[in-house]
Image: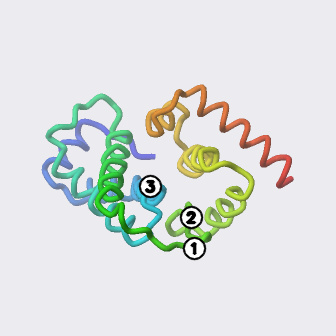
Amino acid sequence: MLIVTKKLIEQLKAKDEFAFEQVYYEYSNLVYYICYSITKDKNASEDLTQDTFLKLLTSLDSYTETGKFKQYVMMIARNLSKNYVTRVANKKPIYSDEEIYNVKEDSNNNLLIYDIKNYLTELQTEIVILKIVHKLKFRVIAEYLNIPASKVQSEYYTAIKILRKELI
């Protein structure tokens, strides 16, 4: 797990390639998942993932070091994805059930996600993926989804009960 320090932020502001690679390696799958969960389009999500990191580099001057760098990256990805969806609102993307909630480059996660979405609501699936696959805390998930942390916990534990009953 990458610990974002003032030194790392300064290196990013100075366009240090190694610092950028560290940040990209740490957050690229999470950013891709956020983009895909909003757009439901694999190609657009890959493009938006790149756009997120470009935007991150160009907007670092406005970042205030409050220890919430991960949330800052997530916010950029979410906003870019929502803007993309708004721009292409008249076009309906065609996608297969297998591509829904696809997590980049990890076939074990893909199989797990495909199985759990058959038993859970979309919200529960998203919470379980963010909690288990991306190892986010309930508070962070709540901020990202704009719902209370208690609702996130309730949905998560309900989902776990359902999965235990259905899959075990």
> Could you say whether the residue bearing mark 2 is in a helix, strand or loop?
loop
Question: For this rendering, which residue is in front, 69 or 49?
Answer: 49
The number of numbered discs placed on residues in the rendered structure image is 3
Return the residue found at the far front.
90
Q: Mark 1 is on which residue type?
A: Ser
Question: For this rendering, which residue is in front, 38 or 58?
Answer: 38
Q: Report x, y in % for residue 150.
A: 60, 25
Residue drawn at x 22%, y 53% is: 55
Residue drawn at x 53%, y 27% is: 148
Q: CA distance from mark 3 to mark 1?
A: 15 Å
Which residue is under mark 2?
Answer: 100
Q: Mark 2 is on which residue type?
A: Ile
Q: Report x, y in % for residue 20.
A: 26, 56
**Is 55 located above or below residue 69 in the figure?**
below
Q: CA distance from mark 3 to mark 2?
A: 10 Å
- Give the mark nearest the N terminus, 3 or 1: 3
Residue 99, by quadrant, is bottom right
Residue drawn at x 29%, y 37% is: 5
Q: As drawn, is 96 to the left or to the right of 87?
A: right
- Give the mark nearest the N terminus, 3 or 2: 3
Q: Which mark is residue 96?
A: 1
Q: Which mark is residue 38?
A: 3
Q: CA distance from mark 1 to mark 2?
A: 7 Å
Residue drawn at x 35%, y 34% is: 68
Q: Mark 3 is on which residue type?
A: Ile
Q: As drawn, is 166 to the left or to the right of 28?
A: right
